[in-house]
């Protein structure tokens, strides 16, 4: 990884410096505990060396736990909690140099908060984290954040928070963590409208049973396109991309998860996504969980794309695109992980590589990639609270 922005915890002086800060807080202030934020900036060791350094981080967390216990005893207080914000997949935590199983088994951590660096990840595999800490007292609190994805100016709305929290609870979360909730300048009416869900969603997510009876909307947007930092080994692109010159005939997939019973007649399930940079002469086969759904999809073509003027409304600009949508039921969708697959059958013969002589330099220009993204699932509950 070329991205930098963190301290190297392999250096003892770095650990000592951080420990002094923690000790000052624990001994001089009436705190209830500490939360270690390993997600700022997801870099704990030099590039390529983190996996072999897990013992260093486990020992460091052990020393923090011992320091908190001593501080609590000195203050004649109860146990001071120790939690950690960690990456949203197991492979990323391993690549960061974190052995969460060892920390939980030894009782060093009271809870962990799986989370993306900056955006709400609707597809956090909560059950994997629960299995990882199984048999210990460590709790799992996945995180909600205000942002929806890289390059998207919009913010999570109330129904989006509900959907993510419903997923988390349904796959075993002990509770929900909130982080980076961007309240911002509420004197700005546009911002106030975008952020209004931040104030109200707390009432929705505190009770899983109540939450299940509320309307909700899942957003499966690109979190970090093309492997951009600060990802640490997992794919969070959340999109299907085709190179016109190289990918004809290829089938590519995108997974998304929704804890919904698609056979429940008390609910409706509206599925939508976009196919960017398509022309009317491009041909694709679209499948959902192995079922070809081309004939089921409604589609609308937007030849001029989605312009920059849409960004203040929370929409990212797009090139020419198709808008696809359909109603889902158990014939096509399943509770849990689903797979959208697209095969590029034919490409527009008028779009191909163009060679140009630009100021004496020969250059080859490629047409824009065909990209399928911005998956949304809207769940409407009859007689919703």
Image (cartoon, rainbow, N blue to C red):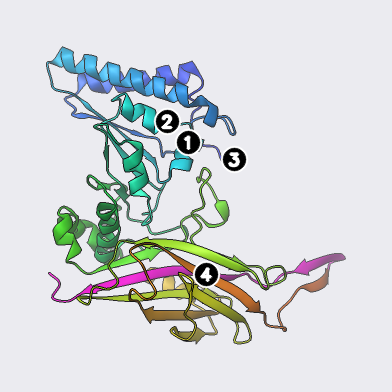
On residue 94, which mark appears?
A: 1
Where is the N terminus found, in terms of image quarters? top right
Q: Which residue carries the number 2 mark?
A: 99
The reply to whether discs 3 and 2 touch (Cβ–Cβ < 8 Å) is no
Q: Which residue carries the number 4 mark?
A: 341
* Residue at image location 60% in from the left, 83% down from the top: 279
The reply to whether discs 2 and 1 touch (Cβ–Cβ < 8 Å) is yes
Q: CA distance from mark 2 to mark 1?
A: 7 Å
Q: Is residue 234 above or below residue 212?
A: above
Q: CA distance from mark 3 to mark 2?
A: 20 Å
Label 4 vs 2, first from the N-terminus? 2
Give the crowd class for mark 1: few <14, some 14-19, many >=20 residues within 10 Å.
Answer: some
Helix, strand or loop under label 2:
loop
Query: Which picture quadrant has residue 249?
Result: bottom right
Helix, strand or loop under label 4:
strand
* Residue at image location 24% in from the left, 32% down from the top: 137
Label 2 vs 1, first from the N-terminus? 1
Residue 180 is inside the magenta segment: no
On residue 119, which mark appears?
A: none
Q: CA distance from mark 4 to mark 2?
A: 34 Å
Q: Is residue 123 above or below residue 107?
A: below
Expressed as whole percent of the image width and height from the top left, the position of residue 35 reads 29, 33
Q: Nearer the viewer, residue 188 or 84?
A: 84
Q: Which residue carries the number 3 mark?
A: 1
Label 3 vs 1, first from the N-terminus? 3
Q: CA distance from mark 4 to mark 1?
A: 29 Å
Can residue 219 be seen by looking at this rendering?
A: yes
Q: CA distance from mark 3 to mark 4?
A: 29 Å
Residue bounds of the magenta highlight = 358-385
């Amino acid at each position: 990884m070329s991205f930098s922005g963190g301290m190297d915890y392999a250096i003892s002086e770095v650990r000592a410096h951080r420990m002094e800060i923690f000790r000052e807080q624990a001994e001089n202030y009436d705190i209830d505990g500490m939360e270690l934020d390993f997600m700022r900036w997801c870099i704990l060791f030099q590039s390529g060396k983190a996996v072999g350094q897990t013992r260093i981080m486990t020992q460091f967390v052990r020393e923090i736990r011992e320091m908190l216990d001593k501080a609590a005893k000195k203050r004649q207080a109860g146990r001071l909690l120790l939690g950690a914000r960690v990456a949203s997949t197991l492979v990323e935590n391993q690549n960061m140099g974190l052995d969460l199983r060892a920390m939980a088994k030894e009782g060093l951590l009271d809870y962990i908060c799986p989370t993306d660096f900056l955006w709400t990840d609707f597809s956090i595999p909560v059950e994997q984290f629960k299995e990882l800490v199984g048999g210990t007292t460590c709790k799992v609190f996945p995180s909600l954040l205000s942002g929806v994805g890289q390059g998207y100016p919009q913010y999570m709305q109330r129904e989006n928070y509900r959907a993510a929290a419903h997923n988390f609870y349904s796959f075993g979360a002990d509770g929900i963590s909130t982080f980076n909730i961007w309240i911002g300048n509420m004197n700005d009416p546009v911002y106030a409208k975008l952020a209004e869900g931040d104030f109200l969603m707390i009432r929705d997510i505190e009770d899983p049973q109540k939450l299940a009876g509320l309307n909700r909307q899942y957003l499966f947007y690109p979190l970090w396109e093309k492997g951009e930092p600060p990802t640490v080994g997992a794919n969070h692109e959340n999109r299907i991309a085709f190179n016109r010159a190289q990918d004809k005939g290829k089938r590519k997939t995108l997974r998304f998860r929704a804890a919904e019973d698609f056979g429940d007649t008390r609910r409706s399930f509206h599925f939508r996504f976009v196919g960017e940079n398509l022309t009317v002469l491009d041909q694709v086969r679209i499948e959902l969980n192995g079922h070809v759904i081309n004939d089921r999809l409604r589609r609308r073509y937007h030849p001029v794309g989605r312009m920059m003027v849409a960004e203040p409304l929370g929409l990212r600009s797009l090139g020419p695109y198709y808008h696809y949508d359909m109603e889902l039921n158990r014939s096509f969708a399943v509770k849990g992980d689903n797979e959208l697959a697209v095969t590029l059958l034919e490409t527009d013969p008028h779009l191909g590589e163009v060679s140009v002589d630009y100021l004496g330099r020969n250059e080859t220009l490629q047409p824009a990639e065909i990209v399928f993204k911005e998956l949304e699932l809207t769940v409407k509950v009859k007689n919703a609270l």
